[in-house]
Amino acid sequence: MNFNKQMIDLVREIRRRVPSDDKPGIKLANPDLLHELIPIFQFSTDTVTKTLIKELFSVAGDGWPERLVEKSFDVDEDEYDNEEPKKRYITKTYRGQTELVEVNVSEEKPQIQRIYRGQLVSS
């Protein structure tokens, strides 16, 4: 497979973000690079890493995005029945660096505490 500039940048960023155990397999010289990224994508908890891998697979084309969503590993369905509600993320850019930041979503309106001259005042 031939890599273009965008794919090379994505692979470098993915290699930088994955745990150190997975780094040896993530090299441009590795012919099975995309195959090795599938389990990393499926078991990763880092949303930015997952997004980068999805982007790499969409740029790779030729059916790669479909391979990413296939369930090729045995996963217990009971384990995911009691999942927490989906978290919301936004992207923030600071000095040219883009970050994916989790946004706190709360159902209750936070109660405001006011302090006047060192004393807590209820409103």
Image (tube, helix red, strand yellow):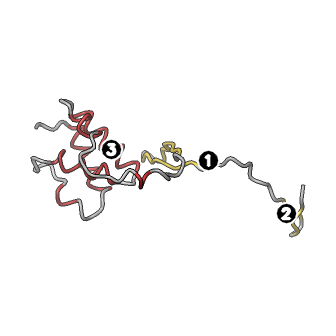
Q: Which residue bears the numbered disc 2?
A: 115
Q: Nearer the viewer, residue 6 or 90?
A: 90
Left or right relative to 53: residue 46: right
Query: How far apart in space, not on screen, are marks 3 and 2 (Cα)?
Result: 45 Å
Q: Taking 104 as reference, is 58 left or right?
A: left
Which quarter of the rendering shows the C terminus?
Answer: bottom right
Amino acid type for the residue under numbered disc 2: Ile
Residue 73 picture location, percent across and down:
25, 50
Q: Secondary structure at mark 1?
A: loop
The disc label shown at residue 105, or none: 1
> Rounded to the nearest whole Å, what is the CA distance between mark 1 and mark 2?
26 Å
Residue indicated by mark 3 = 52
Q: Nearer the viewer, mark 1 or mark 3?
A: 1
- For marks 1 and 2, give the one nearer the viewer: 1
In the image, residue 58 lies at what x, y percent? Answer: 27, 33
The quarter of the picture where residue 60 lies is: top left
Q: Mark 3 near mark 2, Cβ–Cβ under 8 Å?
A: no
**Amino acid marked by disc 1:** Val
